[in-house]
Amino acid sequence: MTTLLASAFEEASKLSETDQNVLAKWLLEEIRSETRWSWAFAQSEDVLEKLADEALEEKKKGRTTPLDLNDL
């Protein structure tokens, strides 16, 4: 465990039991969410590569236009 994480847990241990449980549930959900995101991103690597190749091909063919942030 890193020093920073240990320090965070030390501070969290001073919270009420209810607040500790709220913090723990939030932290666990964040970790699970990050794990799901990492898995989903890894699974979509081939799809993303294909989409990038298609976009580059469209640009080479002159079928793209520059993005104007004022139009968003």
Image (tube, rainbow, N blue to C red):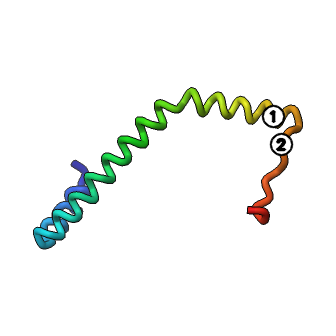
Identify the residue shown where x is 27% and y is 56%. Answer: 27
Return the disc, 1 or 2, that comes first in the chain's sequence: 1
When the figure is inspected, residue 66 is found, relative to residue 26, above or below; the finding is above
On the picture, is 39 further left or further right than 61? Answer: left
Q: Quadrant of residue 22?
A: bottom left
Classify mark 2: helix, strand or loop. loop
Image coordinates for residue 46, horizontal then vertical, percent: 57, 27
Question: Residue 68 placed where, x, y %?
Answer: 80, 58
* Numbered badge on residue 4: none
Which numbered marker is on residue 58?
A: 1
The residue carrying pointer 2 sits among few (fewer than 14), some (14 to 19) or many (20 or more) residues within 10 Å by Cα, namely few
Q: CA distance from mark 1 to mark 2?
A: 6 Å
Contact, mark 1 vs mark 2 (Cβ under 8 Å)? yes
Image quadrant where residue 3 sits: bottom left
Residue at 16% in and 65% down:
20
Examine the rendering and report whether any part of residue 22 can be seen.
yes
66 w.r.t. 63: above or below: below
Amino acid tagged 1: Glu
Say whether residue 4 is visible.
Answer: no
Residue 36 vs 49, above or below: the answer is below
Tell me the amino acid under the disc marked 2.
Answer: Thr
- Residue at the spot 86% in from the left edge and 39% down from the top edge: 63
How many numbered discs, if any? 2
Helix, strand or loop status at disc 1? helix
**Residue receiving disc 2:** 64
Quadrant that contains the C terminus: bottom right
Q: Residue at x 76, y 33 (%)?
A: 56
Frontmost residue, 64 versus 1: 64
In-image side of 9 versus 44 (left or right): left
Q: Nearer the viewer, residue 35 or 13?
A: 35
Could you say where residue 69 lies in the image, as x and y percent from the top left?
75, 61
